[in-house]
Amino acid sequence: MTSQRTIIVALVLAIAGILVGGFGLYRAAAVQSDLSTSMAAAQAASDHAKSAIDRIGVVPLGPAHPTTVPNVAINPANVPPPINRTQPATVKFTLTTKEVTAQLADGATYDFWTFDGTVPGPLLRVMEGDTVELTLVNPATSKSGHNIDLHAVNGPGGGAAVTNVAPGESKTFTFKALNPGAYVYHCAFAPPMHHIAQGMYGAIVVEPKGGLPKVDREFYIIQGDWYTTGKVGDQGHMAFSGDKALAEQPEFITFNGHVDALTKLFPLEAKVGEKIRIFFGVGGPNVGSNFHIIGEIFDKVYSGSPDTYTAKEETWYVPPGSVSTFEMTLNEPGNYTIVDHALYRVLKGAAGLLKVSGAWNPDVYMPPADGVSH
């Protein structure tokens, strides 16, 4: 009996030893796994932090470059007169590609590629049925070839296939404007996304026969996203960042080519009771816009044909490579902020100002007690 008990005790102790040893090995493996997981997580966090640092542009910048023009911002009130004829005509345009150095923000310079030296390029205006003859000029001083793709053109490349111009060349092509609406034009020279990212875009308006309904004022705004080695607030010369462009991580988002284009340089101005029209587009290359004017409702909004408008709209999405038309009646005086309603983009520059003068209408909006708009 005693020997049997001894054998049983020995077996129990052996089994217990095996279990304890196995548990120890399991815990060691688990600890090692947890440690490996923690180290992997720490490395991922470090990589993410580095990626974030790279993304926000803490790369040291060189000093700002001498500018060839102070800025490339186009005045939004610089709009060609409306069409008032009813018969098609032949309309001729000449656009010149210009590579310039200018301010993107106060104290920050950038090397822009443009049509006619502004961002966006000039607004082109024709009527449905017109024959359009367009000449593209690329000065000998340019460093790159360029061309033009107009989304209003029915034909291969929208004109780009027949307008490739090397420095020192010019080319002319002709098309018929078949479809009423407002459309983007842009450079599509390879790689097209890079030329657009440098500022080469604008809009062409094709009015219906007899023209659009009369309004008191018209404005022209194009939003663009900028991929730079520096971030908003940095001083110095901003170089283009292909990595940020590929990752679709813009550091600046502007109206009309400058952070202050529609706030300090060229705020929109109108009067109470006026009906205004805004041709608003997105050059891109990547980021669309949720166009909104704080304190206003759009009477009409349309993308494409004016016959397919939406009435009484608050915010309207405009994708990259597109133009929409906005009409509204101004009821009250004051300062109205223009935004991309993806609102953190305001901090990157996507903000403007519509300044409306005139008398209050208390039936619509009760003014402050002191009678002053704040």
Image (cartoon, rainbow, N blue to C red):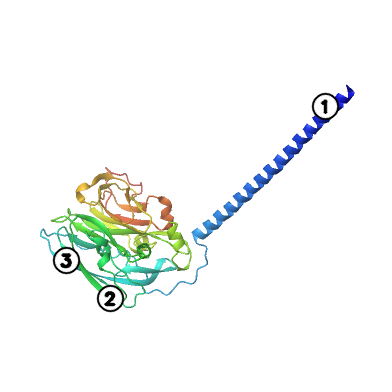
Residue at numbered disc 3: 91
Name the amino acid type tagged 3.
Val
Residue at numbered disc 2: 169
Q: Position of residue 38 (x, y in %)?
A: 63, 48
Q: Which residue: 43% across, 52% down?
A: 344
Name the amino acid type tagged 1.
Ile
Q: Which residue: 23% across, 57% down?
A: 217
Residue 372 visible, this angle: no
Name the front one of labels 3 and 2: 2
Rendered position, 366 above or below 88: above
**Total label count?**
3
Residue at numbered disc 1: 8
Q: Residue 165's mark?
A: none
N-term-proximal mark, 3 vs 1: 1
N-term-proximal mark, 2 vs 1: 1
Q: Position of residue 89 (x, y in %)?
A: 12, 63
Given residues 34 and 341, the one toward you in this image is 34
Separation of residues labelled 3 and 1 (CA atoms)? 108 Å
- The residue most toward the right is 2
Q: Are marks 3 and 2 in contact (CB under 8 Å)?
A: no
Name the amino acid type tagged 2.
Glu
